[in-house]
Image (cartoon, rainbow, N blue to C red):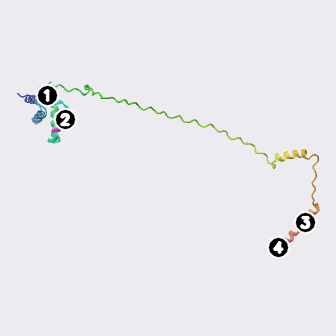
């Protein structure tokens, strides 16, 4: 028996053991035949030695591209689901090795690690010290004017030193009688002037 036919028979029995519906059984087997034909035409015929190649990312990616080019979206999703179910069956029965978990795969080393030196931190400059307080200018006392009381007092104190002896009496050049007469004349004239102005 051909190895691909043997795979189909084993997978069919697995589906029957799960009591799938006849329509589901038909779709699974039809989808598996499409995948086997794709791998045989694009890569190599399947055998016990190379069966694990069905899990390679390159194979599954090209198969998805092939399905998307000739099938509607619903058919693509169904056939990819059938392929996942078949891959799980092969791993459970020991036909292929189970895929390694993602945590067991160590990442490839980087070709180089850039030596990035962080920039030096910039310290803020301290604020300048406050200016020293300027003392207010000293206010010099103004010289005393001759008309100030203290100046007059000092002048009075100096008079005996400048003019020793009793102060001379200053006599008025006009006798008091003439001053009285002049004031009376001014009063009489202003009275008559006011009288005539009111007439």
Cβ atoms at labels 2 and 3 below 8 Å apart: no
Pointer 2 residue? 61
CA distance separating discs 3 and 1: 158 Å
Q: Earlier in the sequence, mark 1 or mark 4?
A: 1
Q: Is residue 78 above or below residue 105?
A: below
Spatial CA span between label 3 and label 4: 20 Å
Q: Secondary structure at mark 4?
A: helix
Tell me, yes or no, whether the two marked residues, 2 and 1, touch with CB atoms within 8 Å.
no
Residue 154 found in image quarter: top right
Q: CA distance from mark 1 to mark 4?
A: 152 Å
Give me the residue at 16% from left, 37% from top: 78
Q: Which residue is mark 3?
A: 184
Q: Residues within 10 Å of mark 2 (few under 14, many from 20)?
A: few
Q: Say which residue appears at 85% left-offset and 72% top-offset.
A: 195
- Residue beneath label 1, please? 51
Dominant SS type (magenta): helix
Q: Which residue occupies the extreme top position in the image?
A: 94
Span colored in magenta: 58-66
Q: Nearer the viewer, mark 2 or mark 3?
A: 2
* Location of residue 135 in the rendering, given as x and y in whole percent from the top left corner: 67, 39
Is residue 164 left or right of 154 when viewed as pictured? Answer: right
* Label 2 or label 4, whichever comes before in sequence order: 2
The residue under label 4 is 197
- Of residue 182 and residue 111, the one placed in the foreground of this image is 111
Q: Earlier in the sequence, mark 3 or mark 1?
A: 1
């Amino acid at each position: 028996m051909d190895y691909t036919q043997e795979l189909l028979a084993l997978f069919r029995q697995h589906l029957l053991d799960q009591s799938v519906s006849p329509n589901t059984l038909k779709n699974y087997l039809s989808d598996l035949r499409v995948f086997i034909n794709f791998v045989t035409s694009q890569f190599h015929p399947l055998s016990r030695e190379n069966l694990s190649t069905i899990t390679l990312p390159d194979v599954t990616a090209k198969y998805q591209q092939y399905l998307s080019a000739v099938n509607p979206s619903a058919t693509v999703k169904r056939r990819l689901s059938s392929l996942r179910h078949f891959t799980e069956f092969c791993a459970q029965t020991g036909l292929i090795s189970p895929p390694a978990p993602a945590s067991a795969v160590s990442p490839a080393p980087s070709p180089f690690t850039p030596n990035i030196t962080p920039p030096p931190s910039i310290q803020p400059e301290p604020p300048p010290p406050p200016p020293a307080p300027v003392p207010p200018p000293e206010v010099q006392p103004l010289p005393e004017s001759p008309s100030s009381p203290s100046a007059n007092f000092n002048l009075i104190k100096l008079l005996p030193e400048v003019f020793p002896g009793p102060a001379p009496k200053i006599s008025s050049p006009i006798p008091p009688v003439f001053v009285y007469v002049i004031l009376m004349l001014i009063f009489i004239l202003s009275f008559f002037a006011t009288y005539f102005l009111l007439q």
